[in-house]
Image (tube, rainbow, N blue to C red):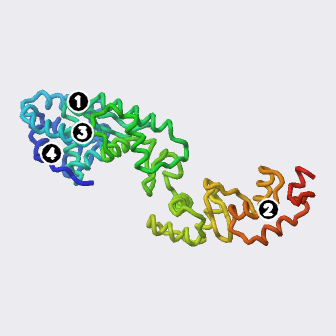
Amino acid sequence: MATITLSFKPKNVTKRLMSALSDRAKLVVTKRYGLDKDNERMTLEAIGDMYSITRERVRQIEHAALQNIRKSAYYKQEKDVFQELHDAVHNIGGMVGEEELLAHFAKDQSSKNHLHFLLVIGDAFKKEKEDTEFKHRWHVDTQLSKKIHEAIRKLYSNLKDDQLIPESEIIEDFLEHLKDVNEKFRNEEVAKRWLNISKQISKNPLGEWGKSSSQNVKTKGIRDYAFLAMRKHGSPIHFRDIAKLIEKLFNKKAHIATTHNELIKDDRFVLVGRGLYALTEWGYASGVVKDVIVKMLDKHGPLSKDDIIQKVMKERYVKENTILVNLQNSKVFKKNKDGKYHLVAVNG
């Protein structure tokens, strides 16, 4: 992410603003917002313990200090600074997740802390705290913020649990819910920035979007990486090659035996040949060749030998003779007078 250069140094601005405070208030604010060399933002409790005062008393001192800064002549003198910061936030979308916003304007943690303090102090900046749906975020336009939140909720409600959508498609769908926003914001860069505030929608390592709770998005282990690798590959593949593909795509060490074991245990994968696996979502049925024939006959009714071979070959990478051997199982399959095979249990 490219850092946007501001004409002012946040540290210098906060130093001037802090001139409005008493020594004790200055110490509390410094510790609360990580404005010293340690760059550590301390809790109300931790600061209270440090100065032997209650958590509530620390909160009161902090609140009064922020109010004093906003009412001071020092604050008025920084009008151009706050206007520049407002315009910068507006230009990158008007609403941005806190981490991403700070990263846009500062590289080191110290500068980020000072910039965060300016956002807190500035009247034009509104913070919405993290909740079950969204991350910490800042905005400079309340109406725009409401529209973005509602559009993300609609997008989420239309997603199926394990659905994966290419980035270009989800951005197109997202912007469909935001037809009345300023045209300058209707682009891929801003749309991704807005989507990034969601805790319920996110993208996997291959850039595909879906519900954050989905194992297809929230990749945790080899089987999840295997699923994404196979999905990208697009056709049945040997488990040895799946392991290699995982290492190539995700830079994750994937032992061949471990990969094979994970594929066996997950119903997203179907064994379709000797060591060859496909994805269930591709339409492959689970089970050995006999099970595949049973499911076909149960679905389609009696079938000729050639029809069975043709259909099984679409499901399994096996020799024709293997299919014919399975059809000789007289306890399961029987040939009728038309030369078609049917299930003994159903028709016998």
Q: Would you call the spot at circle 2 few (<14 residues within 10 Å), some (14-19), or many (20 or more)? A: some
| Near-viewer residue (119 or 105) | 105
- Circle 2/circle 4 CB separation < 8 Å: no
The quarter of the picture where residue 256 lies is bottom right
Label 1, label 3: how far apart the Cα atoms are? 17 Å
Which label's residue is closer to the chain start, 4 or 1?
4
Name the residue at 61% across, 53% down.
281
Q: Amino acid at mark 1?
A: His
Which label's residue is closer to the chain start, 3 or 2?
3
- Circle 1/circle 3 CB separation < 8 Å: no
Which label's residue is closer to the chain start, 4 or 3?
4
Name the residue at 25% across, 46% down.
102
Q: Is residue 308 left or right of residue 170?
A: right
Label 4, label 3: how far apart the Cα atoms are? 27 Å
Label 2, label 4: how far apart the Cα atoms are? 71 Å
Q: Which residue is mark 3?
A: 51
**Front position among marks 4 and 3:** 4
Label 3, label 2: how far apart the Cα atoms are? 76 Å
Q: Which mark is residue 63?
A: 1
| Near-viewer residue (331 or 307) | 307
Question: Where in the figure is residue 240, as x and y percent of width and height?
Answer: 58, 72
SS under mark 1: helix
SS under mark 2: helix
Q: Is residue 98 above or below residue 180?
A: below
Question: Where in the figure is residue 165, as x and y percent of width and height?
Answer: 47, 48
Q: Which residue is mark 4?
A: 10
- Circle 4/circle 1 CB separation < 8 Å: no
